[in-house]
Amino acid sequence: MSPVLQTHDLTAFYGDFQALFGIDMHLDEGETLAIIGANGAGKSTLLRAISGLLPHAADAVLLEGRPVGNLPAFELSHQGISMVPEGRKLFASLSVEENLKTGADAFTRPGFWSLERVYELFPILKERQHQPATSLSGGQQQMVAIGRALMSNPKVLLCDEISLGLAPVVIRDIYAALPQIREAGASVVVVEQDIGQAMKVADRVICMMEGRVTLEGTPADLSREAIHNAYFGDAA
């Protein structure tokens, strides 16, 4: 079976600064892939490139074997790639329900997820559906951001630092939703600075440093020493 998502020699730039150097990775159907690394390693840049927010060659990103690397973010959403951005980026002027509805439009792919199913996944959001989204707690706002991304019925869900700044009990509740998200048909990429959390939820882990992949494997196969060296460099 071919991977649902692949990158080939993927590079990315911010002006003259090169942030990614020839990234080759894949995501299998039904898999959760965790991407770990220190600040500035290129993790979020990789998600931005995959989701169409940074330009690159068409064949640098393949979705179900089709080159999609030259498509803008809105078109990639229609094709099946959706992102939960770092910092949530909710619309402050909109209610919880209005924020969720922005994840769907006339071109949304048919599938499992609807407003009611998002409310079933995160019942607290139904209770707060008419409140301004940014009046919610940080964890509840993160649920809105995830629900908004699910409303497009993605094949690939990209999650950028969804545990950042949240209490451990809230992180546990958010990550507890991942199995149902996968069962509903999405494969998941999680950018996570917390190595322990990444190891708990991932089928496979990629470590990045300075815009390059330095280690890849299953949590069971990766030793603490190997992760340390890939995360910080052998001299660390």
Image (cartoon, grey):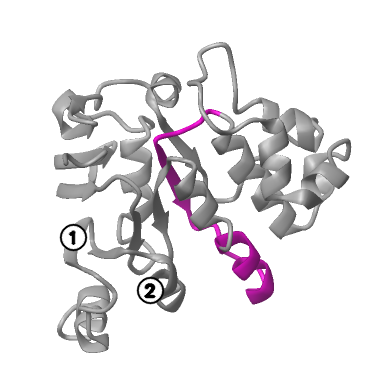
Label 1, residues with CA under 10 Å away: few <14, some 14-19, many ≥20: many
Mark 1 or 2, which is nearer the eye?
A: 2
Left or right, 161 with reference to 211: right
Q: Quadrant of the N terminus?
A: top left
Residue plotted at (43% across, 78% down) = 196
Mark 2 lies on a secondary structure that is helix
- Image quadrant assignment for residue 138: bottom right
Left or right, 59 with reference to 160: left
Left or right, 92 with reference to 152: right
Compared with residue 18, is residue 192 higher up or lower down, i.e. above or below?
Answer: below
Tag 2: amino acid: Met
Q: Which residue is mark 1?
A: 213
Residue plotted at (52% across, 19% down) = 108
Q: Is residue 98 magenta?
A: no
Structural distance between the alpha carbons of marks 1 and 2: 17 Å
Question: Horizontal and vertical percent for residue 113?
Answer: 58, 33
Question: Horizontal and vertical percent for residue 100?
Answer: 69, 33
Mark 1 lies on a secondary structure that is strand
Residue plotted at (38% across, 74% down) = 199
Q: Which residue is mark 2?
A: 199
- Image quadrant assignment for residue 32: bottom left
Compared with residue 230, is residue 11 higher up or lower down, i.e. above or below?
Answer: above
Q: Which residues are magenta?
A: 152-175
Tag 1: amino acid: Val
